[in-house]
Image: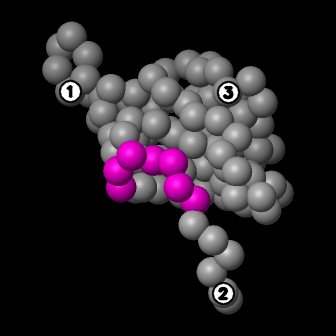
Amino acid sequence: GQEKGTLTGHSGEVLSVAYSPDGSQLASAGVDKTVRLWDPKTMECKGTLTGHDCAVLSVAFSPDGNFVASASGDINYEGRTNCVKIWDVETMEEKGTL
C-alpha cells in the first residue's frame, strides 16, 4: 500500500502504535512519556494522555475499543517499576494503574 501521511506530535521517537478494533482510532506511544490518540482518516491528534514518568513502551486497545492500556518503566519512590495504565478513550482520563 501507499503511505497515507505522517502523524506528527510526539517530541521524540515513537515506540508503539495500535489501531482500535474498528479502525477508527490509532494510539501511539513515545519516549516523550505520552500516549496520543489519532483519527487515522483526518490525521488529526484527538488527545494526549499524560501521567507516565518514563518513556511509554507499548499501547493496546481493549477488544471493545473503549480503553487503551499503556506500558512503561515508571519510577516510584522505591525506584524503577514496570507500570501499566488504563485510559478511557472517550474521556481521556486515567482509570487505573496496574
Which portion, as a residue range, is magenta?
A: 7-13
Asked whether the residues under the numbered discs 1 and 2 touch, taking CB atoms below 8 Å apart as contact, a structural biologist would say no
Could you tell me what secondary structure mostly forms the magenta stretch? loop
Residue 40's place in the image compared with 68, above or below, is below
Label 2 SS? loop
Would you place residue 12 above or below residue 71 in this image?
below
Callout 1: few (<14), some (14-19), or many (20+) C-alpha neighbours within 10 Å?
A: few
Which mark identifies residue 80? 1
**Residue at 66% over, 87% down:** 2
Magenta-colored stretch includes residue 79 = no
Counting residues from the start of the chain, the first of labels 1 and 2 encountered is: 2
Closer to the chain start, of discs 3 and 1, is: 1
Query: Which dot, 1 or 2, sits closer to the camera?
Result: 2
The tag earlier along the polypeptide, 2 or 3, is 2
Res 57 seen here: no
Q: Are marks 3 and 1 in contact (CB under 8 Å)?
A: no
Left or right, 5 with respect to 14, comes to: right
Amino acid at pointer 1: Arg
What is the three-letter code of the residue carrying label 3?
Answer: Met
Residue 83: % across, % down: 38, 30
Q: Which mark is residue 41?
A: none
Q: Amino acid at mark 2?
A: Gln
Q: Is residue 62 left or right of residue 42?
A: left
For the point 63% across and 81% down, the residue is 3
Left or right of 98, for residue 75? left
Mark 3 lies on residue: 92
Mark 3 or 1: the one toward you: 3
Residue drawn at the location 67% of the way across and 89% of the way down: 1
Q: Nearer the viewer, residue 61 or 23?
A: 23
Q: Is residue 65 above or below residue 96?
A: below
Q: Nearer the viewer, mark 2 or mark 3?
A: 2
**Circle 2 sits on which residue?**
2
